[in-house]
Image (tube, rainbow, N blue to C red):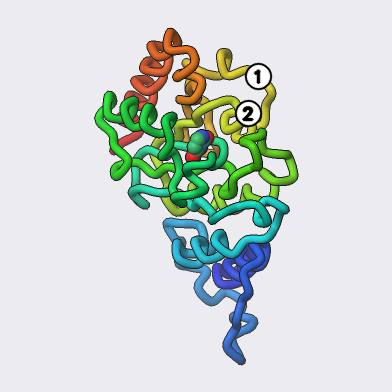
Amino acid sequence: MIHPEQQRRAYLEALGIDVWVPRGQADPEPGAGDSATPEVPDGPDWSELRGAVSSCTRCPLHESRTQTVFGVGNQEADWMIIGEAPGAEEDRRGEPFVGRAGKLLDEMLRAVGQGRDSVFIANILKCRPPNNRDPRPEESAQCRGYLERQIALVQPRIIVAVGRIAAQLLLDTDTPVGRLRGKTHRLGEIPLVVTYHPAYLLRSPSQKRKSWEDLCLARRVATEVAV
Ligand code: URA
Protein backbone atom coordinates (compact mmCIF):
# COMPACT_ATOMS: atom_id res chain seq x y z
CA MET A 1 0.00 0.00 0.00
CA ILE A 2 1.29 3.49 -0.83
CA HIS A 3 1.93 5.55 2.29
CA PRO A 4 -0.31 8.65 2.36
CA GLU A 5 2.73 10.95 2.65
CA GLN A 6 4.33 9.39 -0.46
CA GLN A 7 1.03 9.73 -2.29
CA ARG A 8 0.83 13.38 -1.25
CA ARG A 9 4.34 14.08 -2.49
CA ALA A 10 3.64 12.35 -5.80
CA TYR A 11 0.49 14.44 -6.18
CA LEU A 12 2.31 17.69 -5.42
CA GLU A 13 5.10 16.78 -7.83
CA ALA A 14 2.61 15.93 -10.57
CA LEU A 15 1.09 19.39 -10.09
CA GLY A 16 4.52 20.96 -10.35
CA ILE A 17 4.63 21.97 -6.67
CA ASP A 18 8.13 21.85 -5.19
CA VAL A 19 8.25 19.35 -2.40
CA TRP A 20 10.59 20.08 0.46
CA VAL A 21 11.25 16.99 2.52
CA PRO A 22 12.98 17.30 5.90
CA ARG A 23 16.10 15.13 6.14
CA GLY A 24 15.37 11.61 7.38
CA GLN A 25 11.72 11.82 6.38
CA ALA A 26 12.09 11.03 2.70
CA ASP A 27 10.86 7.45 2.96
CA PRO A 28 8.34 6.62 5.62
CA GLU A 29 8.60 3.24 7.30
CA PRO A 30 6.62 0.60 5.41
CA GLY A 31 3.27 0.13 7.12
CA ALA A 32 3.50 3.43 9.02
CA GLY A 33 0.20 5.27 8.90
CA ASP A 34 -1.48 2.52 6.87
CA SER A 35 -4.20 2.05 9.44
CA ALA A 36 -5.43 5.62 9.08
CA THR A 37 -8.01 5.89 6.31
CA PRO A 38 -8.19 9.61 5.54
CA GLU A 39 -11.64 10.85 4.64
CA VAL A 40 -10.20 13.04 1.90
CA PRO A 41 -7.75 11.22 -0.40
CA ASP A 42 -4.26 12.47 0.30
CA GLY A 43 -2.86 15.35 -1.75
CA PRO A 44 -2.35 19.11 -1.59
CA ASP A 45 -4.48 21.03 0.90
CA TRP A 46 -6.44 24.14 -0.10
CA SER A 47 -3.60 26.57 0.42
CA GLU A 48 -1.04 24.39 -1.41
CA LEU A 49 -3.46 23.97 -4.27
CA ARG A 50 -4.28 27.69 -4.42
CA GLY A 51 -0.56 28.48 -4.46
CA ALA A 52 0.11 25.96 -7.23
CA VAL A 53 -2.70 27.36 -9.37
CA SER A 54 -1.69 30.99 -8.89
CA SER A 55 1.88 30.31 -10.03
CA CYS A 56 1.00 27.76 -12.73
CA THR A 57 2.89 27.86 -16.02
CA ARG A 58 1.89 24.40 -17.25
CA CYS A 59 0.32 25.72 -20.47
CA PRO A 60 0.77 28.87 -22.59
CA LEU A 61 -2.39 30.49 -21.16
CA HIS A 62 -0.30 31.80 -18.28
CA GLU A 63 1.32 34.25 -20.70
CA SER A 64 -1.92 36.05 -21.53
CA ARG A 65 -3.80 35.87 -18.23
CA THR A 66 -4.21 38.83 -15.87
CA GLN A 67 -4.52 36.37 -13.00
CA THR A 68 -5.67 32.82 -12.35
CA VAL A 69 -9.27 32.13 -11.38
CA PHE A 70 -9.11 29.46 -8.71
CA GLY A 71 -12.74 29.03 -7.71
CA VAL A 72 -15.00 30.43 -5.03
CA GLY A 73 -17.50 29.41 -2.41
CA ASN A 74 -18.00 26.98 0.40
CA GLN A 75 -15.13 24.49 0.61
CA GLU A 76 -17.52 22.00 2.20
CA ALA A 77 -20.38 22.60 -0.20
CA ASP A 78 -22.97 19.98 -1.08
CA TRP A 79 -23.12 21.47 -4.58
CA MET A 80 -20.18 22.00 -6.90
CA ILE A 81 -20.77 24.00 -10.08
CA ILE A 82 -18.25 23.47 -12.85
CA GLY A 83 -18.03 25.80 -15.84
CA GLU A 84 -15.68 26.13 -18.75
CA ALA A 85 -13.10 28.86 -18.30
CA PRO A 86 -12.79 32.45 -17.10
CA GLY A 87 -13.95 35.18 -19.45
CA ALA A 88 -12.70 38.77 -19.59
CA GLU A 89 -14.47 39.90 -16.43
CA GLU A 90 -13.40 36.80 -14.47
CA ASP A 91 -9.79 37.27 -15.63
CA ARG A 92 -9.93 40.86 -14.39
CA ARG A 93 -11.53 40.06 -11.02
CA GLY A 94 -10.05 36.64 -10.29
CA GLU A 95 -13.43 35.08 -9.58
CA PRO A 96 -15.51 32.68 -11.69
CA PHE A 97 -18.89 33.63 -13.15
CA VAL A 98 -18.95 37.32 -12.30
CA GLY A 99 -19.99 38.64 -15.72
CA ARG A 100 -23.50 38.68 -17.22
CA ALA A 101 -23.64 34.88 -17.41
CA GLY A 102 -22.56 34.76 -13.78
CA LYS A 103 -25.44 36.97 -12.71
CA LEU A 104 -27.84 34.59 -14.41
CA LEU A 105 -26.13 31.61 -12.77
CA ASP A 106 -26.60 33.33 -9.39
CA GLU A 107 -30.32 33.75 -10.12
CA MET A 108 -30.67 30.14 -11.22
CA LEU A 109 -28.97 28.94 -8.05
CA ARG A 110 -31.09 31.21 -5.87
CA ALA A 111 -34.18 29.69 -7.46
CA VAL A 112 -33.22 26.29 -6.01
CA GLY A 113 -32.21 27.67 -2.62
CA GLN A 114 -28.47 27.93 -3.25
CA GLY A 115 -26.13 30.91 -3.39
CA ARG A 116 -22.54 31.70 -4.27
CA ASP A 117 -21.59 31.23 -0.64
CA SER A 118 -23.32 27.85 -0.22
CA VAL A 119 -21.96 26.17 -3.38
CA PHE A 120 -18.41 25.89 -4.69
CA ILE A 121 -17.90 27.26 -8.20
CA ALA A 122 -14.92 26.31 -10.35
CA ASN A 123 -13.98 26.03 -13.99
CA ILE A 124 -12.27 23.40 -16.11
CA LEU A 125 -9.57 25.98 -16.89
CA LYS A 126 -8.11 28.36 -14.32
CA CYS A 127 -6.85 30.83 -16.96
CA ARG A 128 -8.73 32.74 -19.63
CA PRO A 129 -8.31 31.51 -23.20
CA PRO A 130 -7.66 34.52 -25.47
CA ASN A 131 -10.77 35.90 -27.18
CA ASN A 132 -12.89 33.42 -25.21
CA ARG A 133 -12.04 30.60 -27.58
CA ASP A 134 -12.77 27.02 -26.50
CA PRO A 135 -10.18 25.37 -24.26
CA ARG A 136 -7.67 23.26 -26.20
CA PRO A 137 -7.32 19.60 -25.19
CA GLU A 138 -3.76 20.12 -23.95
CA GLU A 139 -4.88 23.07 -21.80
CA SER A 140 -7.67 21.14 -20.12
CA ALA A 141 -5.36 18.14 -19.66
CA GLN A 142 -2.77 20.32 -17.89
CA CYS A 143 -5.43 21.89 -15.68
CA ARG A 144 -7.36 18.71 -14.89
CA GLY A 145 -5.39 17.80 -11.77
CA TYR A 146 -6.34 21.07 -10.11
CA LEU A 147 -10.04 20.51 -10.65
CA GLU A 148 -9.81 16.87 -9.57
CA ARG A 149 -8.16 17.93 -6.36
CA GLN A 150 -10.80 20.61 -5.77
CA ILE A 151 -13.50 17.96 -6.20
CA ALA A 152 -11.66 15.61 -3.82
CA LEU A 153 -11.38 18.36 -1.20
CA VAL A 154 -14.96 19.59 -1.47
CA GLN A 155 -16.49 16.10 -1.72
CA PRO A 156 -19.77 17.50 -3.02
CA ARG A 157 -23.03 15.55 -3.00
CA ILE A 158 -23.78 16.81 -6.50
CA ILE A 159 -21.77 18.26 -9.37
CA VAL A 160 -23.56 20.48 -11.86
CA ALA A 161 -21.67 20.77 -15.14
CA VAL A 162 -22.74 23.91 -16.94
CA GLY A 163 -22.37 23.94 -20.69
CA ARG A 164 -21.00 21.72 -23.39
CA ILE A 165 -17.30 22.06 -22.65
CA ALA A 166 -17.55 21.20 -18.95
CA ALA A 167 -20.05 18.40 -19.51
CA GLN A 168 -18.16 16.74 -22.36
CA LEU A 169 -14.76 17.00 -20.70
CA LEU A 170 -15.96 15.71 -17.33
CA LEU A 171 -17.93 12.85 -18.86
CA ASP A 172 -15.38 12.17 -21.61
CA THR A 173 -17.96 12.20 -24.36
CA ASP A 174 -18.93 14.22 -27.42
CA THR A 175 -22.66 13.78 -26.87
CA PRO A 176 -24.43 17.15 -27.14
CA VAL A 177 -25.65 18.88 -23.97
CA GLY A 178 -29.27 18.48 -25.10
CA ARG A 179 -28.87 14.71 -24.74
CA LEU A 180 -26.72 14.78 -21.59
CA ARG A 181 -29.05 17.00 -19.58
CA GLY A 182 -32.13 15.74 -17.76
CA LYS A 183 -30.46 12.68 -16.25
CA THR A 184 -28.00 11.78 -13.55
CA HIS A 185 -24.46 10.77 -14.55
CA ARG A 186 -21.57 9.89 -12.28
CA LEU A 187 -18.07 11.23 -11.92
CA GLY A 188 -16.56 8.37 -9.96
CA GLU A 189 -18.90 8.09 -7.00
CA ILE A 190 -20.31 11.59 -7.31
CA PRO A 191 -23.63 12.19 -9.07
CA LEU A 192 -23.36 14.74 -11.87
CA VAL A 193 -26.12 16.66 -13.64
CA VAL A 194 -25.57 18.57 -16.87
CA THR A 195 -27.33 21.77 -17.77
CA TYR A 196 -27.05 24.58 -20.29
CA HIS A 197 -24.44 27.27 -19.87
CA PRO A 198 -25.96 30.56 -18.63
CA ALA A 199 -24.29 32.41 -21.53
CA TYR A 200 -26.28 30.18 -23.89
CA LEU A 201 -29.44 30.85 -21.86
CA LEU A 202 -28.90 34.59 -22.30
CA ARG A 203 -29.04 33.98 -26.06
CA SER A 204 -31.82 31.38 -25.88
CA PRO A 205 -34.06 32.29 -22.95
CA SER A 206 -36.69 29.77 -24.06
CA GLN A 207 -34.36 27.03 -22.75
CA LYS A 208 -34.38 28.42 -19.21
CA ARG A 209 -37.23 26.11 -18.22
CA LYS A 210 -35.09 23.06 -19.04
CA SER A 211 -32.25 24.44 -16.96
CA TRP A 212 -34.64 24.99 -14.08
CA GLU A 213 -35.70 21.32 -14.41
CA ASP A 214 -32.03 20.25 -14.38
CA LEU A 215 -31.36 22.19 -11.19
CA CYS A 216 -34.47 20.69 -9.59
CA LEU A 217 -33.09 17.26 -10.53
CA ALA A 218 -29.76 18.22 -8.96
CA ARG A 219 -31.54 19.32 -5.79
CA ARG A 220 -33.44 16.00 -5.62
CA VAL A 221 -30.24 14.00 -6.12
CA ALA A 222 -28.32 16.05 -3.55
CA THR A 223 -31.08 15.50 -1.03
CA GLU A 224 -31.42 11.80 -1.79
CA VAL A 225 -27.78 11.04 -1.07
CA ALA A 226 -27.82 13.17 2.10
CA VAL A 227 -27.77 10.98 5.23
N1 URA B 1 -18.14 31.09 -18.24
C1 URA B 1 -17.61 30.03 -17.58
O1 URA B 1 -17.77 28.89 -17.99
N2 URA B 1 -16.94 30.29 -16.47
C2 URA B 1 -16.77 31.50 -15.97
O2 URA B 1 -16.14 31.64 -14.92
C3 URA B 1 -17.33 32.57 -16.67
C4 URA B 1 -18.02 32.35 -17.80
Work out whether residue 97 or residue 13 is closer to the camera in this orientation and state it.
97
The structure residue drawn at horizontal position 66% and vertical position 67%, both measured from the top left corner, is 13
- In the rendered image, which quarter contains the N terminus? bottom right
Three-letter amino acid code at the position of disc 2: Gln
Instruction: Say the numbered circle drawn on residue 168.
Output: 2
Up/down of 10 relative to 193, above or below: below
The structure residue drawn at horizontal position 41% and vertical position 39%, both measured from the top left corner, is 98
Image coordinates of residue 36 in percent, x first then y, are 45, 66
Three-letter amino acid code at the position of disc 1: Thr
Up/down of 119 relative to 55, above or below: above
Q: Dot 2, how many residues are within 10 Å of its Cα: few (below 14), some (14-19), or many (20+)? A: some
Residue lying furthest right: 138
Residue 68 visible, this angle: yes
Image coordinates of residue 113 in percent, x first then y, are 25, 30
Residue lying furthest left: 113
The verdict on label 2 being within 8 Å of ligand 1 is no
Q: Secondary structure at mark 1?
A: loop
N-terminal label among 2 and 1: 2
Q: Is residue 7 left or right of residue 45?
A: right
Residue lying furthest bottom: 23
Q: Is residue 217 left or right of residue 92?
A: left
Q: Secondary structure at mark 2?
A: helix
| Residue hosting label 1 | 175
Up/down of 193 relative to 144, above or below: above
Residues under numbered marks 2 and 1 in contact, where contact means CB atoms less than 8 Å apart: yes
Work out whether residue 140 or residue 160 is closer to the camera in this orientation and state it.
140
Quadrant location of residue 7? bottom right
Q: Dot 1, how many residues are within 10 Å of its Cα: few (below 14), some (14-19), or many (20+)? A: few
